[in-house]
Amino acid sequence: MIAIHHPAQLHPGQMVDGWRVVRLLGAGTYGAVYRVEKNGQHFAMKLAMHRASSGDAAQADARLKRELGCLVHLEHPNIVASRAYGRWPDLRTGWLYVILDLVEGYTLAEWVERMHPTAQEVARVFGKLAGAVDYMHGRGVFHRDLKLGNIMVRASDGEPFILDFSAGDYTNAEDLTDAPLPPGTKRYRSPEASRFLRENGDDRNARYEFKVTDDVYALGVCLFDVLTADQPASGAFKAPVEGRLMPPPARELNPRVPELLSDAAMNFIARKPEHRPPTAEVMRRKLEAFAVEAGQDWTTPLHLPATKPHFDPATGPEESVAPRPRALGRAVLFGAVLVVAALVAAFMAARSAPRLASARAAGSSPVSSSLGDAGPVALAEAPSQLRPHVEDAGVSLDAGAAPLVPSTLSSPGVALPPQAPVQKENPAVKRAPTVASPSEAPAKKALSSRGSGAEFLKKCAAASAAVALQLGCPSSSQVRPASDECPSDAREAMFNELGLVKGSSTLLTIDMKQPGSQADLGVYSDGAVRGVVRSGNRRMPTGTILYGQLWTGDGRLLARYTRAQYPDGNTYPVCIAIGEEGPEDGWEGSKPGAVVFPRSFGAYWVSRWP
């Protein structure tokens, strides 16, 4: 059992005040969300990312308390319900958690891509959402961060739910904002709020008065995006909505949108608040009238199933059925290389056949002698064992949390899914057999000629890169680096240009190529690695790719990421570490160079490397 250092690091089977953790669903700036079980019933548990006494600048504890305050005011069939709350492990000083109903389905963006809804179905869903928004306004609650990722559609019956009130507000609530605008997402921010920020951005005491028409506008942008974007989950929107000018009409961007629905969507996102519906109830009545329309425009899918490549940061591009000409050319070239390789292999096999026959006659096997008895079996079974598996539909209940997606195979390190029957709550990790390459034997002999391995590694650790190379030391990635200062250009980029908060964290998929879901374990070795942010915010968005290095030589894991590539293509020097105070202990079965560790883990923005 490893010590718990972070709310995003609970493991399957762990008990939290009688709630059994099943798996991680997602995480964001303010909280981590788990599927939990108690007395045979499943719920979602959201934990604040920091304790009340941690000095957290983002005030995660206070914001989850605020979210709970919003939810206790609300009881509506299309708003997620809270069932319990507490602090763990200590009732006074522990992490705050809230138990919520578990909504199993898709985010609104995923629903569009998977279900290809009709205009009639979209009008029905948004009519219910508008009714829920009007209900919350009637009880003095504002959501303040309505967006596609904070709305779920339940898979069983298509019912929509509004989630994540971490940016919410209610009458007489304590002011947590230390900026002119409340937390939120720029695309869904009303024009009047954006104007207020332009005019008062330098005044830290200025506060925007959030209004009903701000939530109306945000829900209108959600509708506009659902109507016009066939792949909204990837952020591929057809038109910007920010700015003083209106975007093109929805019907102009997508001719499948009925004219009446297009006009209504543009009305909801009018530049001036007085030109929008004054309440969400007006939205609801208009949309519910459209939900009974029966013409062909209303009953055919708004978007055809996508045939173009779709990119996911964790899995890479998904090729279309028809390859592009350049890809086809590469395929032909690759095929030719395979043919040549096969001919060479056949020729070598023919030459070695007499030697193999004599070896068998002598009772020895060249394959077994190099791979061990399990070698041929392990290699034969590897393709099926390494095939990634897909989890059942997961739900992220926190802002910016990304859907759980299976990945492709990994390097460095290989994570194998558990043997049947699959136990998702406690995934077993099987290590591949160690295969000695011919080049390793001379290296071991050279090491022994220099004295004891420990003494030699100490010399390597103390040597400069040039001297280490002359000594013939192992790769520098195998020797854990000492703690030192983060470079000044990275500190400038992170804490000034990007506005990241020193010591804050995000949930990171450590290695993009490790197979399985976020709740799985991986096996990691030394070397270069690419991670991906799974629960970003506007300062470091979901999907940001991080380039770095892993060290596992002492049976623990340390990761340093030094470059961040944002989804818009911009790159920045950074200092992001897994292991805030030094290497993290590996899970059961770890050994030097093969550390068993969760596929996703909390990563910290640091000014000094641990």
Image (cartoon, rainbow, N blue to C red):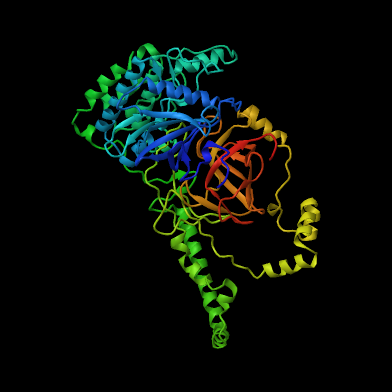
Which image quarter: residue 261?
Answer: top left
User: Which residue sits at x=51%, y=55%?
Assistant: 415
| Image height of 41 relative to 466, above or below | above
Nearest to the observer: residue 553 or residue 226: 553
Which image quarter: residue 308?
Answer: top left
From the viewer's perspective, tell me whether residue 449 is left or right of residue 432. right
Nearest to the observer: residue 194 or residue 124: 124
From the viewer's perspective, tell me whether residue 355 is left or right of residue 208. right
Instruction: Say if residue 238 shows up in the picture.
Output: no
Instruction: Say if residue 223 shows up in the picture.
Output: yes
From the viewer's perspective, tell me whether residue 386 is left or right of residue 525. left
Q: Residue 427: x and y, percent?
A: 46, 52
Q: Residue 13: x and y, percent?
A: 46, 45
Query: In which quadrant of the rendered image does the C terminus lie?
Result: top right
Q: Residue 95: x and y, percent?
A: 52, 31
Nearest to the observer: residue 337 or residue 538: 538
User: Which residue sits at x=61%, y=56%?
Assistant: 591
How many numbered discs? 0
Q: Residue 403: x and y, percent?
A: 43, 40
